[in-house]
Amino acid sequence: MTARRHLSTRSGILWLLLIGLMVSACTRLSDTPAELAPDALQLQQAATKNSGALVSWGNNSNGQVGSTPTGDDFMAVAAGLNHSVALRSTGTLVSWGRNDYGQVGSTPTGDDFTAVAAGGYHSLALRSDGTLVSWGRDTADQVGSTPKGGGFMAVAAGGFYSVALRTDGTLVSWGSDFSGQVSSTPTGKDFIAVAAGSIHSLALRTDGTLVSWGRNSEGQVSTTPTGNDFIAVAGGLYHSVALRTDGTLVSWGSDFSGQVSSTPTGNDFTAVAAGGFNSVALRSNGTIVSWGNDFFGQVRSTPTGNDFIAVAAGGDHSVAIQASPTTDDTPPTITLTTPADGATYLLNQLVHADYSCADEEGGSGLASCVGDVASGAAIDTSSVGAKNFTVETEDNAGNSDSLTHDYTVVYDFEGFFNPIQNLPTLNVARAGGAIPVKFSLSGDHGLAIFASGSPSSQETACETSVPQDTVTETLTAGSSSLSYDAATDTYTYVWKTEKSWGNSCRTLTVKLIDGSEHVASFRFNK
């Protein structure tokens, strides 16, 4: 049976069965997932930023599922009619599945490949120098007429033809021209992505619009959606799918198995691929959704999980890359803004904790971030003294860390009141008298406010260059004492001086239990 006769078989359950039995050699296969990236000149570079393991599902009649290669270093994958090809992080290629035309056995060697595509019975790849290499069936010269020279940046493969995108934004197609998929290739230098179906192609322009060409039997060309907000495209047997900038999907063409009408809703899609009568898409949370024909389990066998990074769809099988588990031995980072380390706050001051934790990019994810109080809640300033605030964090790999900031809570001391003058003034008083040292702490905090051994005084050299003020208010007292007047919110420390201090200068140090020290200078006359 010739390829042309295969193409004419389009309806009924017979066609559904034949597609899995290789009768339709023109079944389209998904292009590389990298053409879904939004960056213009890299739209079709197949390699993802991360590597992972391959997962295949659907029809396994030619080992396209069962012989999926192992390893966790795959960065790109493409699915053909009954075969697949993948790119390793080493730049090498591996193919599996049907091999009757060398689509597996003739896979080229080398470690300089950057993108792959799989067609009906052939594949092609892009090298780092911008040149192309094709292998497999050459019935329509889809291998033999592969363009020479460099300057290519993306590739796609159809049933018996291929199409490539040059770095100058132009397109070139070769191979079978049964429905104008080669001769109708659009001109222009503004293309940034390309996809190939069975015998139709579509491309994305820099302005976000789409253009399709080739066979139009199911409206896969004429019903191409308008609009300028598209960022990715994929072509199936007789249908196509595109991804919009808002993360939504749109499908058109054949709806034989609901591959158009069952297109999922939602605005969180990041990649899409189209197969024979089914499609598959990747969500931003790393999960996969499939729709359309499910004869071989290409929908119901879709793998679960939220760590997938690329998808591809073949004739009646699909392939995805599942991100490799990362070895995470780095704890999350902690940012503790408030309380600041070494900060001083007033008693009962309202201070809101401010902290956050973050796991490194590509890490296992943040599991916990817990402080002494929740971020935004008030820290402890209910008592004076040295305090600390600790934040503890852990990621999902069990790596943990903590960060502690020390802070101090002090009384609201605003200086000494009359008759004492604050520094730098030198207070002049009579030795042997009792001096009322007055101050406020913004409330009654009891009489146990002094640190041990405080207040105290020490003899110092007399300064002659500072202002001086005579203490006019003195008391008669046998010893020093402390009292509090609630009416004026004033503490009074009666400081009993010694007559022997005459003709000397001294420094009075009042140290409170909050750790703060407050000083006044005196000169004593006889």
Image (cartoon, rainbow, N blue to C red):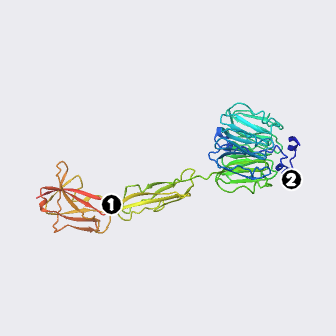
Residue 16 appears at what percent x and percent y? 84, 51
Spot the residue most to the top: 149
* Mark 1 residue type: Asp
State the quadrant of the C terminus: bottom left
In which image quadrant can residue 518 be found?
bottom left
The residue indicated by pointer 1 is: 412
Q: Is residue 507 left or right of residue 502?
A: right
Q: In this view, does 417 lie above or below 118?
A: below
The local secondary structure at tag 1 comes to loop
In which image quadrant can residue 433 be found?
bottom left
Mark 1 and mark 2: Cα distance apart in space: 87 Å
Mark 1, other Cα within 10 Å: few <14 / some 14–19 / many ≥20: some
Please state which of residues 62 and 507 is positioned toward the viewer in this rendering. 62
State the quadrant of the N terminus: top right
Mark 2, other Cα within 10 Å: few <14 / some 14–19 / many ≥20: few
Please state which of residues 29 and 91 is positioned toward the viewer in this rendering. 91
The residue indicated by pointer 2 is: 13
- In this rendering, does residue 221 appear at all? no
* Mark 2 residue type: Ile
Residue 221 appears at what percent x and percent y? 79, 41
Please state which of residues 366 and 41 is positioned toward the viewer in this rendering. 366
